Image (cartoon, rainbow, N blue to C red):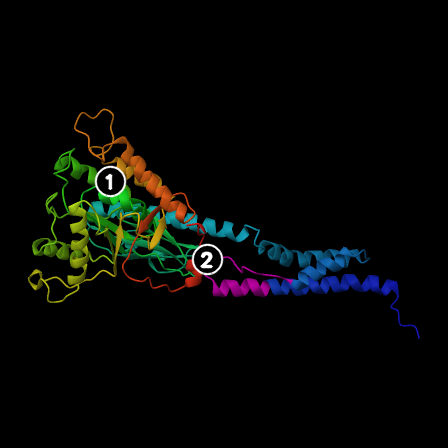
Amino acid sequence: MQTDVPASKTRRGLPIAALLFGLIGLLELGWVWMENIKASPCGKPLTEHYFSIPSLLGFMLLAIRTGGKRLAILGVIASAPGLLLTMASLPSCDFHHSLRAGRESAAIQTLRTIHNYQAQYHATNSRFATLEELAESLMIDADYAGGRPISGYVYSASDITAKTYCVHADRANDKCGYRDFIICEDGIIRFIESENKGAVRRGEWKPIGMSPDDVEISVGGTLIKLARMGYKTGAIDLTRGESGTRGTPEIRAAEAERAAQLLGFTVRENLDLGDARVWANEESRVKLVRALRRLRPRLVFTQFWDDPHPDHAHASQLAREACHVSGLAKYDQESGQERWRPSCVAYFLFPRAVTPSFIVDVSETSERKWEAIRAHASQFFNPQATGPESRVSAKAFLSEVEARDRYFGALIGVERGEAFFVREALNVDDPVALLTRPMNMYS
């Protein structure tokens, strides 16, 4: 019995099959498109891993030399959109990245515009405005104040006072991009790159340093990095550096203020406990506790306790004690402040025998860190200086600081790093994320 299908029928059937597969792929593409529009307020479909088997089959069938040119052409037209989106979903394709980059650029430009309008509003009203007030003043569109997704981002405001404000640009959902942005009264746009939207917020990280340049040298790169991520950073200097070999308290105060601007600080204070006269006594502890309760930092950086400089050693002890008693409700009740205890004290500038608990990659912030260090011009090497020389003013000192940053960077396989030690065991939520980061196996 004859069972073979005549070749002519096969040649006629293939274009029809190709057309059907192409139409199925087109319907599938339409469904994906609509689902993305419903699920994502980004405004454009962003299915990351689209793969259209019908569209591919349609093209494969058309690759066979067949008749039925009209049907073949229709099959190509129907299959093409699904195949193109399949190709755009490949990891090597930058299609989705380009869309996200465009959205991020629009969000950054919007934040800059809002910042300019905030300055105008403040000049007229002596305070910053909510987004609703900016909209009422016809400075921004009402959609930005209504919490509606605009090009994949939702805008909101926080920390609105006479002197402060923050405006957030948060992704409408996790498909809209990788980053959330924030701009505050200092005009610096900061971001955080996270899988979870809405993660960037103004936070508090503050170092406690003995003299005005200790922070810049040991933790400057980390603080710049945190500020760029959206955290609120600042410093509490314990002395004015009046016993230093070079400079005057007035000169050093001006230098510290300039460095604070470069570091992105929102606050820098000086407790003036007396240079070379810092002690962990009750008077100093009360001063520091009141500053901590007022500023409410979540994390405190300070000097390591084993240091040959007595002010450094005492500053370390004072910081740890103050962070603890600051959380006692009945301590210094006469101040009328609410208790506050930072989550952790992390130490910097420790002896070579101490193994760091963690190292922060500061390769991208190193240049700005060195600008902040050089802001303390009275303290460091200057061939035109005529005053007496000290250890920190020697030419080799800054080379040692740079070598230390490079050493700690090498331990984690990056160009530069800043190392910290904590007494407590670190509580790791995601060990896979932590232990799959690039590391130096020989460190």
Q: What is the secondary structure assignment of the residue under circle 1?
A: helix
Q: What is the secondary structure assignment of the residue under circle 2?
A: loop
Place of residue 313 in the rendered image (x, y in percent of width and height, measured from the top left): 18, 50
Q: Which numbered marker is on residue 301?
A: none
Look at mark 2 in the image and give the residue it sits on.
436
| Residue at the extreme front | 353
Relative to residue 83, is residue 222 depicted above or below? above
Mark 2 → mark 1, Cα distance in angstroms: 35 Å
* Lateral position of residue 357 relative to residue 92, left or right: left
Look at mark 1 in the image and give the residue it sits on.
259
Seen at 27% across and 48% down, the residue is 351
Mark closer to the chain start, 2 or 1: 1
* Lateral position of residue 57 relative to residue 263, left or right: right
Q: Amino acid at mark 2?
A: Thr
* Lateral position of residue 62 relative to residue 38, left or right: right
The residue closer to the viewer here, 380 or 425, is 425
Q: Residues within 10 Å of mark 2 (few under 14, many from 20)?
A: few
Seen at 31% across and 57% down, the residue is 201
Q: Is residue 128 something one can see in this rendering?
A: no
Q: Amino acid at mark 1?
A: Ala
Seen at 38% across and 45% down, the residue is 409
| Residue at the extreme right | 1
Which quadrant of the view contains residue 148?
bottom left
**Does the magenta-highlighted stretch encompass residue 126?**
no
- Please name which of the two marks, 2 or 1, marks the residue nearer to the observer: 2
Quadrant placement of the N terminus: bottom right
Which quadrant of the view contains residue 255?
top left
The residue closer to the viewer here, 376 or 173, is 376
Q: Which residues are magenta?
A: 30-52
Place of residue 53 in the rendered image (x, y in percent of width and height, measured from the top left): 66, 63
Q: Is residue 231 something one can see in this rendering?
A: yes
